[in-house]
Amino acid sequence: MTRRRWFEIGLCLMALGISHVVSAQELRRFTAGSYDRIVQAHAGKPFVLAVWSLTCEPCREELELFSGFLQKNPQFELVLIATDTPADEPALRAALARHRIARAEIWVFADAFQEKLRFEIDRRWYGELPRTYFFNAAGVRQGVSGKLDAGRIDAWFAAK
Amino acid sequence: MGVMKIVVALNAKVRSLAVLMAMLCTMSVAVAQEHDAVSHAAHEKLGLATNVVFDANGRLWRVSSADEHVIVQYSDDKGRRFSAPVKVNAEPENIAADGDNRPKIALASNGAVYVSYTVHLPQPYAGHIRLSRSIDGGRNFSAPITVNDDRAAISHRFESFLLDAQGKVHVVWIDKRDQAAAGKQYAGAALYYATSTDATHVTSNRKLVDHGCECCRIAMALDTDGVPVIVWRHIFGKSARDHALQRLDDRSTLIRVAEDDWEIDACPHHGPTLAVASDGTYHVAWFTNSAKRQGLFYARSTDRATFDAPMPFGDLQAQPGHPALWVRGQNIYLAWKEFDGTRSAVRLMRSTDGGRRWSATQTIATAQSGNDYPLLVADGKTVYVSWNAQREGYRLIPLDEKVASR
């Protein structure tokens, strides 16, 4: 079974309404310029931009953490960017559903020239995952590599 | 998409949404199958991730992947043209083929071609290590065997292998069986080891070490006495993901390459490289991003016990990464990748005195499309950079003309 066929079947399941809530959202294609558009769209509001991947084990626990935080805090704005490929859409949706990410803006890298996408996000980020950016209302961001602990998000949310 | 137009056209006539959706599904899958047929016919584009090796006659062997198959080809004209793709695995499998986890290839002195790869299982992060060989010059490959004797659907991934002078295959990989047994308090994953003489049978697996990092390639080379040596990203203390070296005999213990103290609970996806010189010097290069050191570093050990102070290289503002080392005698080549915001570049330094002093950095090639790690490979007389890029294609770039005079 090729990835494309899984994708088609995934679309079918979506159409049949079997999917989880987050599956209803568009999985947006992250390409050159996407990072600036995300930052502009969230200007004036604090938000978290988190980069993850299907192949990253610590990301699994990070998604769990976000899931709990999303449920507790309706104003928490989360942008999730997966560094996998658009062909991984069914697996990405399955992972998000498994970790009960009910509400987030979801993106996937859509250019094999990954360096370019990484560079646009942060030229001093070298691809380690998870990688999380905390934005305040003024648009100032702080980047963190590695799995977060709950206290880190709480502190940011309280201070924002 | 055409399917959507049909949906609109049908919408007025078909009252039952369920019927419509069922039709859409049938059509959609049929379209997908048609695509598959076309791509099979056209030998769907090879993946970017490759490994290469020269045989004694100057033939370049390349392993890559396409459409759920590991693919082997060779070139007799230094990488300009390659032979028709030969599938290693007859049955389609989900092949790990990017970044630090990709199919490997090595040759025995009797001409046998060995290939290893990781197959992804449907479960997250799960995989098995496969091994196959061809004894008819790469025309046919044996049914791949599974190297890991733990068959749980957990992580057995990131394999590396080499052949010793007797033609024995040594395979090392990252294995989560101990983590699965111990639970969450077990940091990282163990490294396991097995050997095979024929890619049909494999020895029972032996644990080398606990608490390796989960997602970085393992560098492997033969020591001067024929014993394999590995370098990998290890977890020291709670979560310092620094590099360790170990000889795969029963006596040697782990040597820490450098105390970077990169405390991070993350997947760097960024493994080291190792070369052993004929005088027994170990040459290692790696990436770290700790408070103490950031970027790429090189260090050598002349006593098999301690490493010199790490030497930084690469431009930190240009995403330096994925180093490769090649050594013969006192000549050492060190290649890596950088990105300046527009172009990727393969950068290179050379030492002619065993790693004491290094040349200035040169750019060997650039790419403006998705591209693979740079590799170093040598035939009898020339060292080459092997580099694959989406638009620029596969390139094998001889280094001696460019570098020898400097």
Image (tube, coloured by chain):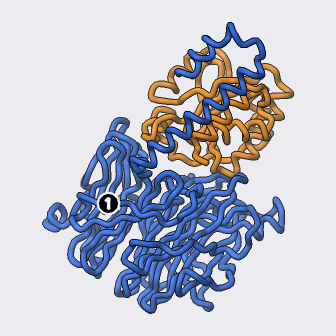
> Which residue position is annotated with label 1?
B386
| Label 1 Cα neighbours within 10 Å, binned few <14 / some 14-19 / many ≥20 | many
Q: Residue at horizontal 28%, vertical 46%?
A: B366
Where residue A10 appears, x then y in whole percent? 68, 35
Tell me the residue at 64%/62% (across/down): B213
**Res B211 quadrant in image:** bottom right
Question: What is the x, y in percent for residue B23?
Answer: 68, 26
Front residue of B355/B139: it is B139
**Chain with orange colouring:** A
Q: Residue at x 42, y 76 (%)?
A: B113
The three-letter amino acid code for the residue at tag 1 is Ser
Chain letter for the part of the structure drawn in blue? B
Write down the chain letter for disc 1: B
B201, B206: nearer the viewer = B201
Residue B163, image x, y percentages: 46, 82
Q: Residue at x 37, y 52 (%)?
A: B337
Which residue appears farthest toward the top when viewing the image? B12
Q: Which corner quadrant holds the C terminus of chain B?
A: bottom left
Q: Is residue B23 left or right of residue A41?
A: right
